[in-house]
Image: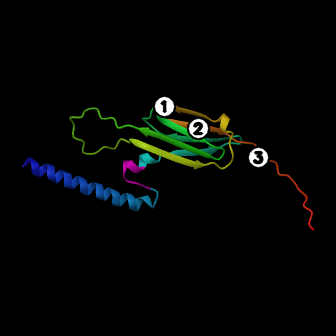
Amino acid sequence: MPELEVWKKQHINRLKEDMDRIFDRVWGEFGRSSSPKQIKAMPLVDRMETATHLIIKAEIPGIDPKDLDISVTENTLVIKGETSQKIVDKNHVFHRIEQKFGSFSRTFQLPCRVRVDNVTATYSDGLLEVVMPKCKPEKMRKLKVAVK
């Protein structure tokens, strides 16, 4: 009889995964997801601007700063990282895991050019902060064009 219980659990788990995928497709169109996989792929981000800097704050709890890859061009910021699953005891049977793990990547088009050499990033208590100094706007040049 234990074989029947294992078989039923496998089929119920498969049904649950199928239902999660269906809801993710539906809710994904509205910017929401029911599965931790979708949530972990996109860390929550605040984007701010001052007169002199662009600032991005991202919630990325449980990651080692060494596992973060941040790259900046004059008008793009890319944040990549990976968290590993932390299972304390392999003798337990998990019915549901909601801890976020896996890789993620976010790319941001910046509203203006930044000085790449002066970008700083800090990570503390699960919060990544990237501060990017803005380039000074180019002065408009007036050019007289002779019309023939």
Camera-side mark, 1 or 3: 1
Against 44, is 86 above or below? above
User: Mark number for residue 121?
Assistant: none
The numbered mark, 1 or 3, whose residue comes first in the sequence reads 1
Q: Is residue 27 or residue 66 the one in the foreground?
A: 66
User: Mark number for residue 130?
Assistant: 2
In this rendering, would 131 be left or right of 138?
left
In this rendering, would 45 be left or right of 13?
right
Residue 145 is situated, as x and y percent measured from the top left of the image, at: 90, 61
Residue at image x 9%, y 47%?
Answer: 2
Q: Residue furthest front?
A: 148
Distance of mark 1 from mark 3, alpha carbons?
34 Å
Label 3: few (<14), some (14–19) or many (≥20) C-alpha neighbours in 10 Å: few
Camera-side mark, 2 or 1: 1
Residue at image x 35%, y 59%?
Answer: 23
Residue 135 is situated, as x and y percent measured from the top left of the image, at: 72, 42
Q: Amino acid at mark 3?
A: Pro
In this rendering, would 7 be left or right of 107?
left
Residue 36 part of the magenta-drawn span: yes
Residue 44 is situated, as x and y percent measured from the top left of the image, at: 49, 45
The numbered mark, 3 or 2, whose residue comes first in the sequence reads 2
Q: Are marks 1 and 3 in contact (CB under 8 Å)?
A: no
Q: Amino acid at mark 1?
A: Lys
Q: Is residue 37 or residue 124 the one in the foreground?
A: 37
Q: Amino acid at mark 2?
A: Val
Q: Are marks 3 and 2 in contact (CB under 8 Å)?
A: no
Residue at image x 37%, y 53%?
Answer: 34
Bounds of the magenta span? 32-38
Q: Which residue is mark 3?
A: 137
Q: Which residue is mark 1?
A: 66
Q: Is residue 147 or residue 54 the one in the foreground?
A: 147
